Image (cartoon, rainbow, N blue to C red):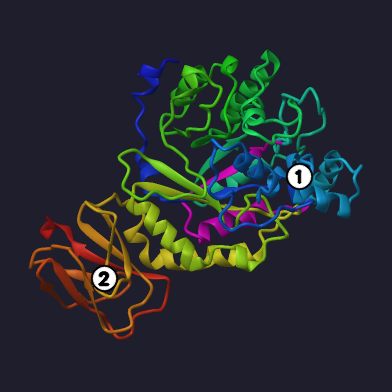
């Protein structure tokens, strides 16, 4: 059945099994902003913002921890980024001067090393930023920016990374900033009004954005269309979606075309909370996205104190998975394409944990409840497969036994520790269940117990 460019037809598209199964993806923000590489750090990203409060919104833009917003930030009077820029480069030094510097340094980028790192981290898909808000494209596009003729890569970073990612068995998705392009719209964005008015709605920009997305689909056949901020209504997003599904039936589309896109742009396969996780199981698919630190783009101002630990990342993967989500975790390489060791080391540690415990993550679905705890207060997240329930227990218990509250499994249940050979001894204690743990348990951020599902209610 061919999809038609209507909300009704697009709504018949189902989220494919691969996206439900994947659970963990890597986002890559690599752009010209990695030359200045500065924003005031904040581990929680932009944090809690009252969008109805003008002062709160103004503070968010002025003090954004997102280094990839550097061009906008240095145009906001009194911002930390503006002060940094003037002290480092001078008040009259334009952002445009960073573009050729980035293109020169980018020659040294080894995308094969990226793909190898992401595979070792246990990621099942990758989303690469092809064009961020500064308008610089990272593929040799046929559709040149009418305001910045040379703001495109001659080397095909998108194509090279796509091939490297697929060669390692991962899916490849593409990000494109459809709603903000600072080369088409004046700076700065410093209020809700200027933000909402920043999406170019001209015929010229609509044709430009549509041509880019169609070129990306034609050349690279991405598994994910990851748009950002919004999209011009005149670009007819519903027609783009239908053509995409007809070409790639198991592709998925995020919910960030919606702003400014009219009725046709409201369709999506999944929602994308940023620097946030949910407190309940959602019926529909979702994806939590955030950086390892408080920025997506590389930020030299972020010390280790501002980065998630490997333990925090593992707990986040388990938490998001238990609630029907995926985690899209961002890395921000330097201008010459190196993933800083502070980021890479965390990914490798996560990969080590997933190799032992991935059965409790990949391909699972939410159980009847997402979270629980032991009688000593240790947090647990639950997942399930067709045959098993999994309890992912955060941390390592102090003693040789744990009791899981309100588990309610039948007496014939077999209990195993993932990565350990023999079944474990256990005992029902009313609705609770006590499990004797082996003395040689490995240390790590969490361990996973498996219960046979044929005995579960």
Q: In the rendering, at what x and y percent does residue 136 appear?
A: 74, 36
Residue underneath mark 1: 32
Q: Is residue 106 visible?
A: no
Q: Secondary structure at mark 1?
A: helix
Is 119 magenta? The answer is: yes
**Quadrant of the frame with the N terminus:** top left
Q: In the rendering, at what x and y percent does residue 172 appear?
A: 53, 42
Query: Mark 2 packing: few (<14 Cα in 10 Å), some, or many (20+)?
Result: some
**Quadrant of the frame with the C terminus:** bottom left
Q: In the rendering, at what x and y percent does residue 54 appear?
A: 61, 36
Q: Is 150 situated left or right of 61 in this image?
A: right
Tag in front: 2 or 1: 2
Q: Residue at x 20, y 64 (%)?
A: 451
Residue range in magenta is 108-133
What number is the disc on residue 374? Answer: 2
Q: Residue at x 46, y 29 (%)?
A: 248
């Amino acid at each position: 059945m061919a999809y038609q460019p209507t909300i009704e037809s697009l709504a018949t598209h189902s989220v494919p099994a691969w996206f439900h199964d994947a659970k963990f993806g890597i986002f890559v923000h690599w752009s010209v902003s990695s030359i200045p590489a500065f924003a005031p750090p904040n581990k929680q990203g932009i944090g809690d913002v009252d969008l109805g409060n003008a002062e709160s919104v103004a503070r968010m833009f002025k003090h954004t921890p997102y280094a990839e917003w550097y061009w906008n930030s240095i145009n906001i009077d009194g911002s930390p980024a503006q002060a940094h820029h003037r002290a480092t480069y001078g008040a009259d030094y334009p952002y445009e001067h960073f573009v050729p510097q980035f293109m020169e340094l980018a020659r040294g980028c080894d995308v094969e090393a990226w793909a190898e790192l992401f595979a070792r981290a246990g990621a099942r898909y990758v989303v690469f930023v092809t064009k961020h808000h500064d308008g610089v494209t990272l593929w040799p596009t046929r559709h040149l920016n009418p305001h910045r003729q040379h703001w495109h890569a001659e080397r095909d970073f998108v194509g090279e990374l796509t091939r490297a990612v697929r060669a390692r068995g991962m899916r490849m998705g593409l990000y494109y900033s459809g709603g903000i392009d600072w080369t088409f719209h004046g700076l700065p964005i410093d209020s809700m009004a200027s933000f909402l008015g920043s999406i170019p709605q001209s015929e010229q920009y609509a044709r430009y954005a549509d041509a880019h997305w169609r070129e990306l689909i034609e050349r690279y056949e991405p598994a994910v269309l990851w748009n950002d901020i919004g999209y011009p209504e005149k670009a007819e997003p519903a027609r783009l979606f239908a053509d995409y599904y007809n070409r790639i039936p198991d592709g998925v589309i995020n919910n960030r075309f919606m702003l400014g896109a009219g009725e046709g742009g409201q369709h999506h396969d999944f929602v994308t909370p940023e620097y946030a996780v949910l407190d309940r199981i959602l019926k529909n698919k979702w994806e939590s996205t955030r950086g390892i630190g408080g920025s997506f783009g590389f930020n030299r101002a972020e010390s280790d104190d501002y980065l998630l630990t490997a333990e925090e990342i593992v707990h986040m993967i388990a938490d998001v998975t238990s609630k029907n989500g995926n985690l899209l975790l961002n890395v921000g390489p330097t201008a010459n394409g190196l993933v800083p060791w502070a980021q890479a080391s965390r990914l490798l540690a996560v990969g080590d944990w997933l190799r032992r415990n991935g059965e409790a993550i990949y391909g699972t679905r939410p159980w009847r409840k997402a979270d629980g705890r032991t009688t000593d207060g240790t947090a647990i997240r639950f997942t399930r497969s067709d045959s098993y329930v999994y309890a992912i227990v955060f941390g390592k218990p102090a003693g040789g036994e744990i009791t899981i509250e309100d588990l309610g499994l039948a007496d014939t249940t077999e209990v195993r520790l993932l990565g350990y050979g023999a079944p474990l001894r256990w005992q029902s204690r009313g609705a609770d269940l006590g499990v004797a743990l082996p003395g040689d348990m490995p240390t790590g951020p969490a361990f996973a117990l498996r219960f046979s599902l044929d005995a579960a209610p």
